[in-house]
Image (tube, rainbow, N blue to C red):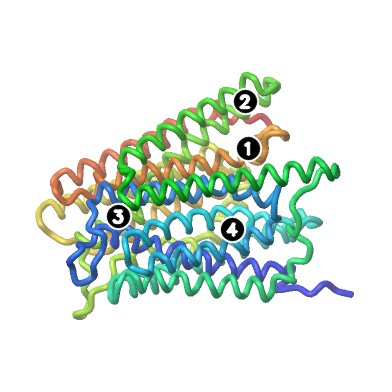
Amino acid sequence: MTEPTWAGHPRGLATLFFTEMWERFSYYGMRAILVLAMVAAVDGSNPGLGLSAEVAGAIYGLYTASVYLASLPGGWIADRLIGQQRAVFWGGCIIAAGHFCMALNTTASFFIGLILIALGTGLLKPNISALVGQLYRDDKGARRDAGFSLFYMGINVGAFFGQLLCGYLGEKIGWHWGFGAAGVFMVLGVIQYRVYGAHLGDAGLLPARSGDVQRDAALHRKGWLGVALFLLALTAITALALNGVMTINAVRLAQGTGVGIVMIATAYFAYVMFFGGLSVDERRKVGVIAVFFVAAAMFWSGFDQAGSSLNLFAQNHTHRTFFGWEMPASWLQAVNPLFIIILSPFFAALWINLGRRNLDPSLPVKMSLGLVQMGIGFLVLYVAAGFVVQGEKVAPTWLILTYLLHTTGELCLSPVGLSAVTKLAPPRYVGQMLGTWFTASALGNLIAGLAAGHLADESNVAAMPSRFLLVFMTTAGTGLVLWLVSGHIKRMMGNVR
């Protein structure tokens, strides 16, 4: 009997496609208005939290970094305690609860909501990708790659429409309407996941087991004890902070977290390279992963300005009125997923055609191209900021061109980066090395939030061009250095392509 399919793929892919689409709808829809809601005046027509750009950027950076960091324990919980299928379901429920908390329109519920969304995304995000892979356990060829491409398309479709709808509701009606809409559509995603979850079969249904019943039971108890203690500590800290017993400086916390991530990553790579029992060849490859870690963190530190400093630039310095109607500032963020949808097939065909002619750029060259294009995007903003300093509002085409360059940079760096880590990592360290890739994203997002407070500082608009120019020099300069040493890195990679 022929296996039922969806567009030529396992039927479970449709379940995961729409779950991820609505989850990304909610995530990017909320993110599109997050900083705008935090900096909005408390007594304005659309009341916000009245925070400074520096504090709002730091909170934004902590939140987005936490989403990536939470994916590490989220994957562990699924592997050891509940399985991927339950992790996705409960992750979606926690995310929806977080959005509805933010919609309650109080300061306490706002921050509780952010915490819940970060925890829920940590459960859902890594495990739904793992489920896609498990649907193709016996299919390692082009059909598997096509399945992941379809899944990736769902991410960008959700991001595009989420930013349009939540952005419109949040800016035009009320921030809590935008946050609430994100929760409603996450609930839709959870419902369809529950209704059509049977199509997943036994993929990710149960946690991993060693076969030793007593040992598995002991690990299960210890695992849940660890989760309970963590949640208890997080609840206590949150309660103390919201009641004024404990004061948390968001900027200093973000700075300290960034330093901590750098120290831990450095210590980890040093330990694996010198005490991990690796061969000389494996040690070289881990060194390459460390270089890619730095490149990825640098890239995401610029790319994720879209939700923070560039969002504020769109609100404060971009002409958005057409025929008497003012376009929401958050709508400009929807340009990135739209460009991804349009350009992804082109880039896929480009690499294939170049490969046939033996002209396909090496992995380090592709990553350097991503960084250089990221930098050029900020060079565009440097020119635009020159007009802003003169008191003008600039056309939205400046930001659109920046986002186009950031998107083409993303298509050069992001898809090949994760693939490179899986190829380069020593077999016994693959999972941990994949974790470092998520950690690089977390570090980049954290840096982005901290930098946003300076890039979007309305009290010193005159310094805006020089700050955008500094970002260009830093990111494009890193890309240029990576390109110059790409030949040496390629030799360190050995036969990995």
Front position among marks 3 and 1: 1
Numbered disc 2: secondary structure: helix
Q: CA distance from mark 4 to mark 1?
A: 19 Å
Q: Residue at x 70, y 70 (%)?
A: 197
First along the sequence among labels 2 and 1 = 2
The residue where tag 2 is placed is 272
Q: Are marks 2 and 1 in contact (CB under 8 Å)?
A: yes
Instruction: Report how many numbered discs are placed on residues in the image.
Output: 4
Crowdedness of circle 4 by 10 Å Cα count: few (<14), some, many (20+)? many
Label 4 belongs to which residue?
124
Which dot, 3 or 2, sits closer to the camera? 2
The residue pinned by badge 3 equals 310
Amino acid type of the residue that numbered disc 4 sits on in the rendered structure: Leu
Q: Pointers 3 and 2 in contact (CB under 8 A)? A: no
Label whose residue precedes the other's in the sequence (2 or 4) = 4
Which disc number belongs to residue 432? 1
